[in-house]
Image (cartoon, rainbow, N blue to C red):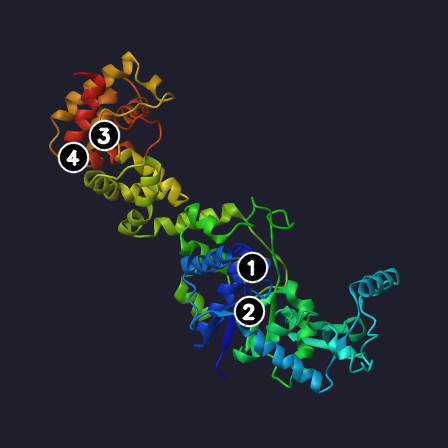
Amino acid sequence: MKVVTRFAPSPTGYLHIGGARTALFNWLFAKHHEGQFLLRIEDTDRRRSTSDAVDKIFSGLKWLGIECDEPPVFQSSNSTRHIEIAQKLLNQGKAYRCFCTQDDLTEMRKKARSEGKTRLYDRRCRDYKPTESELNNSSSIRIKMPTEGKTLINDIVQGDVKVSNDNLDDFIIIRPDGTPTYMLAVVVDDHDMGITHIIRGDDHLNNAFRQLHLFHACDWTVPKLAHIPLIHGSDGAKLSKRDGSLGVESYEKMGILKDAMNNYLLRLGWSHGNEEIISRDKAIEWFNLNSIGRSPSRFDTEKLLNLNTHYIRNSSNKELISYILPIIFQLMGSEISSIAIDRIERGMPGLKQRSKSLIELARSSLIYNTEMPILIQKDAAEHLNPKNISLLSCLHQNMKKMGKWDHDSLEEIVRETAEDNNIKLRQMAQPLRVALTGSTVSPSIFEVMEVFGKDETLNRLKTVTKV
């Protein structure tokens, strides 16, 4: 059997973390089995669906590198087919017309809730024989659900789950205005698209009991079901914006690499031994539904950033340059010179060791984008007092005599100058850092000087010391 999975978001908002993980799990499962991954936009709620939300779903999946194997399906375009199936079920006596008004339904719900019942519709129209004139009136169409026994779902993740059929309403499949409901559309589309495995959040488990009977009523094969526990915040409660209930595009803007995001999403509820760093190729090779846990996972922003740090450190320098140049442009508001780009690339080995995000990396790279005269930050200016200026002047004279200009040689000359002036190395390093970068924070100052080169380093020191 060819495996076919689908991701079916509603375009009523951004692509959130839970949806992104569901898409990833479906994609990985399909790729593991050399099957197909499909995308369906469930836009039957026309009032709440927006084109902006559709665009964000597409862009979010594109950023994550999750590509569907066929053009996306828009559920609203299949309404004729949905209505055709509903009519067929009606003709077969597996569904019936319901003429209850909204007031009737409100009264039924109140009564059912007061009696502690979960089935809110009393099925009064189930065996009702409408007259010819009544058939011309507007009505909804309800599916006939079993009235006795229990419904069992053999879920790949949740195991065997049962519900008493007395708790299941004869739910509406066609509204009084003639439009199909979500419940009907999902089942028809899953069948028509040839979906073999439905992998989704466990908040859909209640729907699954109802959809199962609709598959049976249509005499269709029921796809295998896998309902994934939801993602909670770091405190175990519902996700807040601080903890991750943002669109995935927000994490791209935060400077998270897509490989880090995919790796993190993969480990939210799925595991492979003690493996933490998992490449895409390994994820496809290892992924299976049996390794998904039954407990909710917790979104931890700090853990995501730590994982991002790993991926930044292991990315190529040229790749990182391509990521941060647009960010630097936004920070500076101007294009970057080729000289600065060259410096940033040469300084990248050190810069990327200290950055948790591309934003941090871009900001720390700015030291290589500054030209003379450099702006000394207010909190750094105190390091350029007369005593330290004198020390830097001495260092400037010693550096002028240097032949070899590399990290070790620079560290040696700075250390020797410090010892000659009876001070510790760190007392020399911080004024030197401020003089060269304008800031008290930078990669190793010896690394910075190596990147700047001899002429630029001496010119910067000369500007500060006025020698």
- 454 vs 249, nearest the viewer: 249
Q: Quadrant of residue 211?
A: bottom right
Label 2 is placed on what type of residue? Ser
Res. 160 in view: no
The three-letter amino acid code for the residue at tag 4 is Trp
The residue under label 1 is which amino acid type? Ser
Q: Nearer the viewer, mark 3 or mark 4?
A: 3
- Label 3: which residue? 371
Other-residue count near label 1 (Cα within 10 Å), few / some / many at <14 / 14–19 / ≥20: some
Please report whichever mark, 2 or 3, sits nearer to the chain's N-terminal start: 2
Report which residue position mark 2 lands on.
Answer: 76
The residue that mark 4 highlights is: 405
Q: Position of residue 128 (x, y in %)?
A: 83, 80
Image vertical order of residue 423 relative to residue 275, above or below: above
Expressed as whole percent of the image width and height from the top left, the position of residue 286 reads: 46, 69
Neighbor class of circle 4 (other Cα within 10 Å; few <14, some 14-19, many 20+) is some
Question: How far is the residue under mark 3 from the one under mark 4?
Answer: 21 Å
Q: Is residue 304 left or right of residue 240?
A: left
In the image, 116: left or right of 288?
Answer: right
Q: Amino acid at mark 3?
A: Glu
* Residue under pointer 1: 49
Confirm or deny contact between disc 3 and disc 4 (CB under 8 A): no
Q: Quadrant location of residue 409?
A: top left
Look at 18% across and 21% down and name the residue there.
462
Q: Residue at x 24, y 31 (%)?
A: 411
Residue visible at 87% across and 63% down? 111
Task: Kindly indicate whether the residue at mark 2 contacts the one at mark 1 (C-beta within 8 angstroms).
Answer: yes
Q: CA distance from mark 2 to mark 3?
A: 57 Å
Q: Looking at this view, is 50 or 332 the one in front?
A: 50
Of the image marks 1 and 4, the number of the one nearer the N terminus:
1
